[in-house]
Amino acid sequence: MSTSTPAGSEAAENNTFVQAGWEAALQEIQHQATHLEARGALRGAVTLFDAIRIARAGGLNCEHRTRV
């Protein structure tokens, strides 16, 4: 890392890659849910669509897990 690179840039860049990866994964899950829906597998499609909504909302609150 050069001295011209601000401190924390690497962390910000890694976070951008992580966000992009999560978004790509959620888009793929949505794509597969759409295929299931088209085939008439509505229960599976709804489950995947719900999982996407939960993930985008930050997950579920669980009594044995503390969030920071």
Image (cartoon, rainbow, N blue to C red):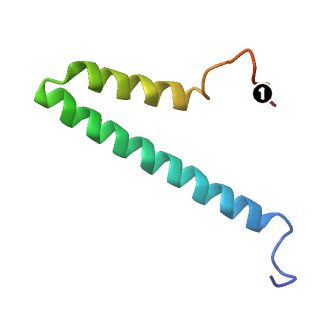
**Residue corresponding to mark 1:** 67
Residue lying at 12% horizontally and 30% vertically, measured from the top left: 39
Please state which of residues 3 and 10 is positioned toward the viewer in this rendering: 10
Q: Quadrant of residue 7?
A: bottom right
The spot of residue 51 in percent (x, y) is: 45, 27
Question: Callout 1: helix, strand or loop?
Answer: loop
Residue lying at 75% horizontally and 68% vertically, measured from the top left: 10
Residue furthest out toward the left: 39
38 vs 66, left or right, is left
Residue furthest out toward the front: 64
Residue lying at 84% horizontally and 70% vertically, measured from the top left: 6
The spot of residue 14 in percent (x, y) is: 67, 62
62 vs 29, left or right, is right
Q: Quadrant of residue 38?
A: top left
Residue type highlighted by circle 1 = Arg
The spot of residue 3 in percent (x, y) is: 87, 82
61 vs 48, left or right, is right
Q: In which quadrant is the N terminus drawn?
A: bottom right
Please state which of residues 27 and 7 is positioned toward the viewer in this rendering: 27
The spot of residue 33 in percent (x, y) is: 28, 33
Question: Counting other residues with Cα less than 10 Å from the Cα at mark 1, is it few (<14), some (14-19), or many (20 or more)?
Answer: few
Residue furthest out toward the bottom: 2
